[in-house]
Amino acid sequence: MKKEILALTLSVAMLITGGLTSVTAAEFEDTSICADEVSSDVNEDFDSLDIREDTEVEFDDTENDFSSDEHVDFSYDAIDSSDSEFIADKTEVFTEDVGINDDTNPENPTVSVTPSREPLKPAVTESIVTGLEKPLKFYPSKFYDFTVTGAGMDNTDPIENDERWEPLYWSTKNNPSTIQVNTRWRIGSSKGIMESNTYSMYIFFKKQFFDCKHGWEYTEDIQSLRITFESDSITTSELDSWINSDKDEYGNPIPTEPPTVTPTPPTVQMKVNTHSITLRTGQSTSSVKVTNSTPYFRVVAWYSDNTSIAKVNPYGKITAGKRPGKTYVTVVMSTGEAAKIKVTVQKGKIKTKSISGLKKKVSINKGKTLKLTPVLSPQTSQEKISYSSSNKKVATVSSKGIIKGIKAGTTKITVKSGTKKFVVTVTVPKTTTKKITGIKSAIKLKKGKTYKLKPKKVPANSDYKISYNSSNKKVATVSSKGVITSRKKGSTTITIKSGKISVKCKVTVK
């Protein structure tokens, strides 16, 4: 009975003993394991499989559909082991130029100036994969995590010209397309596998070399490492028991009395500020951001599907090529999670299609400032933003979008980019008096004498004037400037008011 081999490509490297075969980029496609020898009946099983379906499992042991996650859709080919050399327990190395145009690695460890040894140049076959050593029981939609350590990645004291291999991704193809690339280190079968068998997978690495001045730098050398793993047989009773049990996200049965374990930290889902950008030929942008990255959840790689359309450096700066077209840029996190950004390159100037990120109405106090932060769509628009105020006596706006309140009133701030406009209505409210100081609670005057009141408003720029009033003008009067004039013996109360705030002063005339 022929064995069916599933070609699986993992972005990690398993250290497996065996012969190595180096294949040039020109020969790469010709060595594809997806050759004419593929069994047509097995291919039909894989082509009809949609692993995203979240429905009742109908188990068929002929459908050995592997994936890294139940929510990821990839294409796979089954291979007749009798006609293929890939079933042998060998490790094969493939090289490929996938067009990743990285400048330098941001990791720059401290280096001793004088080398104390010869440079380390490990082979990609020295990379190690753990978690797939033993035969695995592939129940329907059960997944297994595994880990990868690239050759030389444990080098903590590098010297000039040391080399290492950084794991990038895995795939079921030795020359994968974008949708066949997988950056999550887990494997499973949505339909399950009943029989024990041997399978192949590919792991892709990128070579780095150490430069004493710049630290670790990427090369253009991409190599894939073929490794094998095994499935363990599953009995009908084991399958029935598994199907009828409650399961966790990995497909593991949940026991009635769960054991005491240390809870796993919650998985962080990456957030990207945009999933598509438009660039003019030759234009660059660093506007694509992972908005929730942390030191423990960080970006580890950027790469472009087609560097002739657009290339990207290790820091996420995307640069359009000289000809128009479309491609995808992928950003990979330290957890293996990845996101794709569609990049469209055109010849003409990138024009603004809309302006957002602003409120239609804002209020700002006199003397205070407020900065406008408009968002242009597309983010890469090449049309500048301008600002203008309809009433500069009420509020002004700078070329950088900073509004300043001048006096109480209303004005309109127009934000313009190209032919697009956004109008913000700005209201500067009156500044109210909060208290009045500098007034004595009582004074005494001789008949015919005067006294000047000197009240102070808080705040001093209050828009409300001070007024004065006497409760008995026959005893004493007060002018609009706060001058009290005594008339005859007796007493009166002078009220000093500003807005809703008032204070009183008792005047006694002797």
Image: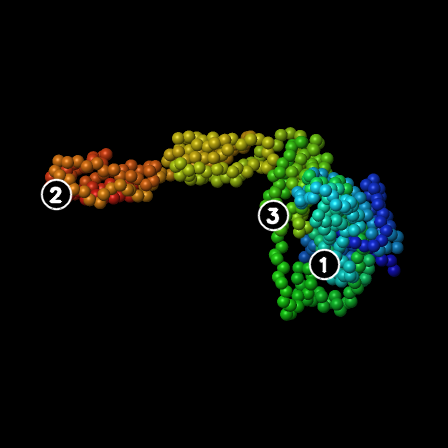
Residue type marked 1: Tyr
Residue type marked 3: Ser
Give the number of callouts: 3
- Depth check: give the residue in front, 501 or 382: 501
Q: Is residue 389 left or right of residue 295?
A: left
Tell me the quarter of the picture where residue 380 sits.
top right
Residue that appears at 80% across and 48% down: 123
Q: CA distance from mark 3 to mark 2?
A: 78 Å
Categorize mark 1 by other alpha carbons within 10 Å: few (<14), some (14-19), many (20+): some
Q: Earlier in the sequence, mark 1 or mark 2?
A: 1
Residue that appears at 66% across and 48% down: 333
Q: Position of residue 143 (x, y in %)?
A: 71, 58
Q: Earlier in the sequence, mark 3 or mark 1?
A: 1
Q: Position of residue 216 (x, y in %)?
A: 70, 43
Residue type marked 2: Gly
Between marks 3 and 1 in the image, the one whose residue lies nearer the viewer:
3
Residue that appears at 68% across and 50% down: 336
- Depth check: give the residue in front, 371 or 153: 153
The secondary structure type at the circle numbered 3 is loop
Q: Position of residue 292 (x, y in %)?
A: 59, 48
Asked if labels 2 and 3 touch by Cβ distance under 8 angstroms, the answer is no
Residue that appears at 21% across and 36% down: 452
Q: CA distance from mark 1 to mark 2?
A: 99 Å
Residue 123 numbered tag: none
Categorize mark 3 by other alpha carbons within 10 Å: few (<14), some (14-19), many (20+): some
Q: Is residue 362 left or right of residue 204?
A: left
Between marks 1 and 2 in the image, the one whose residue lies nearer the viewer:
2
The residue singled out by tag 3 in the image is 293
The residue singled out by tag 2 in the image is 490
The residue singled out by tag 1 in the image is 144
